[in-house]
């Protein structure tokens, strides 16, 4: 692993991907380490979070919730940073903060986007079980879908950063949890380590049939992280009064055109109507002001008492971020994917 | 108009329609007027409500919320009835009640499905502005979509029984209301009589463009009664945080197969996610226990003070119900469609 030092390595967007990104869509360049001006802090990146939404900001047409990354500019992303130098009254060299440095060694900040982390025992948890993905699970499941005891909750990408927390929170609320994950190892982990009642392999050609068998009373809550064939299997099983939280659609992020017909949109609308489904999209940026304090309090306790955990899939070295990210889009990660950019 | 008398005329389902029903899918037969046993009342039908959902219970595969009508059995439907004879302690001959007699002159009831109407000045209002369609608008708009002052509310089938009330309630709450209706007469009525801000003709080939122009700030609430091309025009205009109440999909009720591709389901899910849309289906049967009393109180006042009104499209004679119903599915009605079955 390269040690960060006197240059600022930056992973920039070299070209806009067609479909699944390739390593050639990224380029590593080197720039001078910037010097903080009055009111600024210089941050060194310790950990970089890799998340599926980053695929969407690589496109020329951005998602509604964030601008596109510009060609030649560093990829964006949440980070854990150490303050290296500070001309800001609120931060001192050595402070550990949650930031948005993106895919690079160093960044300047005016401080308003930083959250002080104190001295976290495992700083990278601020990107996972104590950070954005778990907060997404918290709001999307507890606030929006509102699981009740003995309800059946189905969650896709069940060992991913969001899905793993969704399943554990649903169990905490007394629900029955059926996960869907890619491969036998992940499924075993979901059941044995995370406490899911059942976990099914999304690659199983008989997924729809197995999901029906695993949900004899139908599905009360579906937490959508993927789309595609998984949603197709879920839709007919949704119960009257079901809630669907739409958090991610990773199966579709690389699509350049609409999938072939028939057009199943009216089928979905008919299900929403006849089954009185409540479906809601969650973009977690909306909820920090209102709900992050409650999340930190609740999740801090659940993590400390071992009731919620999240496996970390750690990759060493900023230069490996592109390959790791492409693997994430293909489901190769196992747990929350983070890049260790620099030794502390 | 035939006068009801000593026989019970019944409009029965003769065959299951393929696509749009035809008059041959119905048959009028005659049966003896039944005699009430102990605990029963005999009801004569004064008014029969015709509503789009009735198309769905004509299919062999029923909608989730109601069973199919069996071949040879009377079509189902809400009615205003006069009690003719009673062996039930709660009802006396002459009482006016809201019932579910279906498409026939007489029916027996054990009373549990009846609501006493007292002496309503316009009894057929119990099927419209004081009944099921307006109650659907009340729950679907006020409880679910929750309009706020200055928001833009779009409602399809804007002069229909539900849509007309939705628009007026949205205006009552200070929202800007854009209706979509079939033809210039209906559009003029929506603006001049119902107080909509704008109303667009759904048959306009440039509907999508005109809707965009009519909603310069986007759409905050869409009340879905139709589906099809209208929803296609609405979807790109929905704002962040938009609410969509799915109440009806009349454009799809006659479809025997899924529409051709591309498959736009992922596009809808992407919009739900990125725009944090909350979409919910309303089947009004769910809400009588909790909300009907509040509706009757509120709507009774709004109707009495002239703040909400609903045009009635009245057809005379049970024998004309099939043709009127087919016209409803084609959008030929103008206001709440009721059949006057019998003089009082």
Image (spheres, coloured by chain):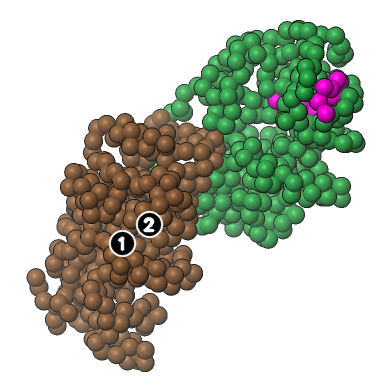
Chain colours: A green, B brown
Q: What residue do we see at 60% from left, 15% from top?
A: A70
Identify residue for label 2: B172
Q: Nearer the viewer, residue A195 or B305?
A: B305
Q: What is the CA distance from the residue labelled 1 to the residue labelled 2?
A: 9 Å
Which of the image's four quarters has the N terminus of chain B?
A: bottom left
Depicted B330 relative to depicted B306: above or below: above
Q: Where does the image place residue B339, in percent across and percent down from the top left? A: 19, 66
Q: Nearer the viewer, residue A131 or B37?
A: A131
Discs 1 and 2 carry the same chain letter? yes
What's the magenta region?
A: A77-89
Q: What residue do we see at 47% from left, 47% from top?
A: B243
Q: The numbered mark 2 sits on a residue in which chain? A: B
Whether residue B27 is visible to the viewer of this picture, yes or no, is no
What kind of secondary structure does the magenta stretch mostly adopt?
Answer: strand
Q: Secondary structure at mark 1?
A: loop
Q: Which mark is residue B308?
A: 1
């Amino acid at each position: 692993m390269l040690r960060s030092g006197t240059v600022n390595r930056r992973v920039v967007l070299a070209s806009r991907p067609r479909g699944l990104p390739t390593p050639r869509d990224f380029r590593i360049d080197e720039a001078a380490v910037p010097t903080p001006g009055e009111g600024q802090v210089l941050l060194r990146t310790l950990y970089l979070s890799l998340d599926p939404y980053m695929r969407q900001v690589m496109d020329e047409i951005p998602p509604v919730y964030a601008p596109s990354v510009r060609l030649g500019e560093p990829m964006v992303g949440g980070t854990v940073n150490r303050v290296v130098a500070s001309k800001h009254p609120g931060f001192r060299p050595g402070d550990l903060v949650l930031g948005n440095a993106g895919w690079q060694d160093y960044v300047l900040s005016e401080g308003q986007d930083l959250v002080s982390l104190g001295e976290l025992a495992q700083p990278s948890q601020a990107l996972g079980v104590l950070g954005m993905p778990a907060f997404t699970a918290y709001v999307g499941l507890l606030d929006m879908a509102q699981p009740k005891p003995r309800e059946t909750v189905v969650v896709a990408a069940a060992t991913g950063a969001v899905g793993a927390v969704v399943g554990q929170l649903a169990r905490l609320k007394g629900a029955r949890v059926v996960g869907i994950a890619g491969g036998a190892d992940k499924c075993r982990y979901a059941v044995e380590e995370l406490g899911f009642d059942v976990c099914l392999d999304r690659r199983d050609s008989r997924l729809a049939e197995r999901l029906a068998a695993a949900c004899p009373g139908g599905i009360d809550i579906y937490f959508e992280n993927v789309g595609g064939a998984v949603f197709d299997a879920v839709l007919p099983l949704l119960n009257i009064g079901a809630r669907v939280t739409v958090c991610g659609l990773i199966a579709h992020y690389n699509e350049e055109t609409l999938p072939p017909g028939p057009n199943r949109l009216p089928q979905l609308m008919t299900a929403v109507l006849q089954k009185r489904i409540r479906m809601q999209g969650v973009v977690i940026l909306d909820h920090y002001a209102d709900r992050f304090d409650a999340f930190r309090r609740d999740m801090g306790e659940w993590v400390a008492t071992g009731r919620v955990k999240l496996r970390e899939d750690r990759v060493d070295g900023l230069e490996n971020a592109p390959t790791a990210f492409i693997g994430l889009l293909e489901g190769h990660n196992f747990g929350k994917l983070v890049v260790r950019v620099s030794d502390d």
